[in-house]
Image (cartoon, rainbow, N blue to C red):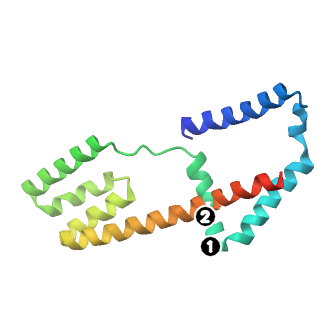
Amino acid sequence: MDFATIIGLILGFVAVVVGMVVKGADVTALLNPAAALIIFIGTFAAVCIAFPMNQLKRVPKLFKVLFGSNKKDLSYEQLLELFVHWTSESRKYGILSLEQQLDKIQDEFLLRGMKFVIDGVSAEDLEQILESELEAIEERHAKGAAIFSQAGTYAPTLG
């Protein structure tokens, strides 16, 4: 889990508890099972009505992404060094020599791009293919974010 996510969750909880204490409210009111059922199940039901099942099936995976361990992306400098290395390797030993590097690539998008390069796909076609993939990835991410955004809209109305 990303450290910022942990901090955000803790600060959010602390803000609610401190706000209740300052207001003089009973903090045990947060432990109301009936209210929790109405809020969480009601929010889930509203989200189920708003989104098709094929999108809802992705929610557990989205939670894993949100709360799971964060893969470290390569920095721009690391990525640039990698490209320079691959360019040097391909000039010395030929483009097919890059196949030996494929098992070291952890990023799926980068791996697909390298496979296309090794297969001899032209630069123009490669650009078009990868741009199309990026658009599809962005659309998929937007749909996933919309589920959580909509849930965030419904939950306060039920609570």
Quadrant in the picture for residue 133 = bottom left
Nearest to the observer: residue 7 or residue 97: 7
Q: Residue at 7% of width from left, 54% of height from top?
A: 92
- Report helix, strand or loop for mark 1: helix
Q: Is residue 139 visible?
A: yes
Relative side of 140 to 91, left or right: right
Circles 1 and 2 in contact, beta carbons < 8 Å: yes
Distance in Å between CA atoms under marks 1 and 2: 7 Å
Q: Which residue is mark 1?
A: 54
- The amino acid pointed to by label 1 is Asn
Q: Residue at 74% of width from left, 71% of height from top?
A: 49
Nearest to the observer: residue 117 or residue 157: 157
- The amino acid pointed to by label 2 is Arg
The relative height of residue 65 versus residue 123 in the rendered view (above or below) is: above
Q: Which residue is mark 2?
A: 58
Q: Residue at 36% of width from left, 60% of height from top?
A: 109
Q: Position of residue 80 (x, y in %)?
A: 23, 46
Q: Which mark is residue 148?
A: none
| Quadrant where the image shows the N terminus | top right
Relative side of 42 to 103, left or right: right
